[in-house]
Amino acid sequence: MILLNKSKYSLVIQHLYSMTINNLFARSVIENKVNGSVYADKLDNPETFYIVHPYGMSLLIGNINNKKFNLLFRDYALNINKSRLKNEWMQAFPDKWHTVLNDLFKESIIKSSDNNNKMQSGILELNTRVNFKFNIKKYTIFKNRLNLSDIKIVRTDKKIFKSMKGTVIPFYFWNNVNDFLKHGIGFSIFYNNKLASTAYSAFIHDDKLELGIETIKEFRRKGLAQYTCSALIDYCIEKNFEPVWACSLENIGSYNLALKLGFEEVCRVPYYKLSK
């Protein structure tokens, strides 16, 4: 596996455009909207790629029959040489990759249901990611029932960006606050004068905006996320963006919130947790 220079990222573009599953996180890396990493099998005319977003999401794409690359990737995924310092969550395209991965890792792949949600070195944990499609008619019905009379929603500014805490916050999806303010968008709620919830653009490409959402732990289970998300969805409708939602099947809260907001499940995609 060779780490590609950013000047070579354009070699991956056509592979991404051929995908039929959500790949906005990978496009953010390839299009230099965020500082990630791209590995390939060779410098000249590469055929197989591994794209890593700084948050940890990753994508294996390209020629599935590249035996040398596959063996090197196996060592990387299992972290044999301890070169990988962070956990990663990998998707693969096309679907034929999953047969290759199953053969490549054999007994090192375990189902998430058998792992008790523990990150273990030397294994790949198999999970399921859900892609959704936005249904504006369902959203409109939901929005008409939403009581906004006592809710104050504000635009996410520099102060909010820097003070928002959690594991899925804008800080992890943008290079810096200035990039976010210039190219992104977010909406936040304060509860008892404390910052409680933020919905924001994790990725924006062409006419698509993928939603990110975080509610600070002490303010969860109060239904705040539906308000910040609805503000962001309204922004999408106003600006002619298609709202995009994806989450792990195991994330019951995110899954149910998506359905409430008018999103419909369109496909389920295997993904793998790679422990450091």
Image (cartoon, grey):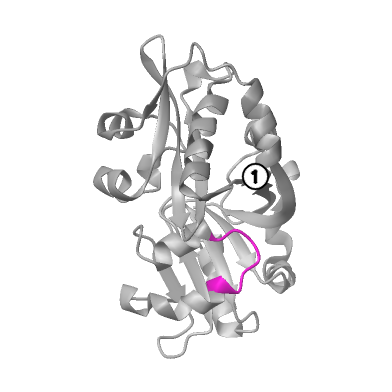
Depth check: 85 or 224 in front? 224
**Magenta residues (range):** 16-23
Callout 1 secondary element: strand
Residue 59 is left or right of residue 55, and the answer is right
Above or below, 145 relative to 230: above
Is residue 20 found inside the magenta-colored segment of the image?
Answer: yes
Tell me what residue is drawn at x 65 percent, y 33 percent.
140
Residue 52 is left or right of residue 163, and the answer is right
Outermost residue on the bottom side: it is 44
Residue type at mark 1?
Ser
Quarter of the view holding residue 28: bottom left
x and y percent of residue 55 in the render?
A: 44, 50
x and y percent of residue 147 in the render?
A: 58, 16
Above or below, 151 relative to 50: above
Magenta stretch: dominant secondary structure: loop
Residue 190 is left or right of residue 268, and the answer is left
Q: Report the residue marked by disc 1.
A: 248
Quarter of the view holding residue 90: bottom right
Task: Examine the rendering and report whether any part of residue 272 can be seen.
Answer: yes
x and y percent of residue 257 in the render?
A: 64, 32
Tell me what residue is drawn at x 41 percent, y 63 percent.
29
Tell me what residue is drawn at x 44 percent, y 44 percent.
201
x and y percent of residue 177 in the render?
A: 27, 43
